Image: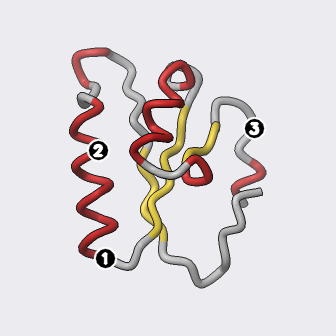
């Protein structure tokens, strides 16, 4: 459980893409997340699918580990 309150403002980012040519570089996510956190009062969640799980540690260095969520299986826990 990620302790997300009902009144929490969220921006969810899913870095996955079907083709490698469509994927952003990790540095772009770092810049985006830092800017969102600095300029808004939103919490950022990074949603990882099966292909992104191998880069989990990298995404956890961009956002806190409790903001990186594995959605590669069942996503019912997000409801």
Q: CA distance from mark 2 to mark 3?
A: 26 Å
Q: For this rendering, which residue is in front, 59 or 78?
A: 59
Asked which secondary structure carries label 3, the reply is: loop
Q: Which circle, 1 or 3, is nearer the viewer?
A: 1
For image coordinates 53% across by 19% down, the residue present is 54
Residue matched to label 3: 74
Q: For this rendering, which residue is in front, 9 or 19?
A: 9
Q: CA distance from mark 1 to mark 3?
A: 30 Å
Q: For this rendering, which residue is in front, 68 or 11?
A: 68
Instruction: Looking at the image, tell me whether mark 1 or mark 2 is earlier in sequence order.
Output: 2
Q: Which circle, 2 or 3, is nearer the viewer?
A: 2
Of all residues shown, which one is farthest toward the front?
61
Instruction: Looking at the image, tell me whether mark 1 or mark 3 is earlier in sequence order.
Output: 1
Spot occupied by residue 55 in the image (x, y as percentages of width and height): 48, 24
Q: Is residue 3 left or right of residue 20?
A: right
Residue matched to label 2: 30
Badge 2 crowding class, 10 Å Cα cut-off, few under 14, some 14 to 19, many 20 or more, is: some
Residue matched to label 1: 40
């Amino acid at each position: 459980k990620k302790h997300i309150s009902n009144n929490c403002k969220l921006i969810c980012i899913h870095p996955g893409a079907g083709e490698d040519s469509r994927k952003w570089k990790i540095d772009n996510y770092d810049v985006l997340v830092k800017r969102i956190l600095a300029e808004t009062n939103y919490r950022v969640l990074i949603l990882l699918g099966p292909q992104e799980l191998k880069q989990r540690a990298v995404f956890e260095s961009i956002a806190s580990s409790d903001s990186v969520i594995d959605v590669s299986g069942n996503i019912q826990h997000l409801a």
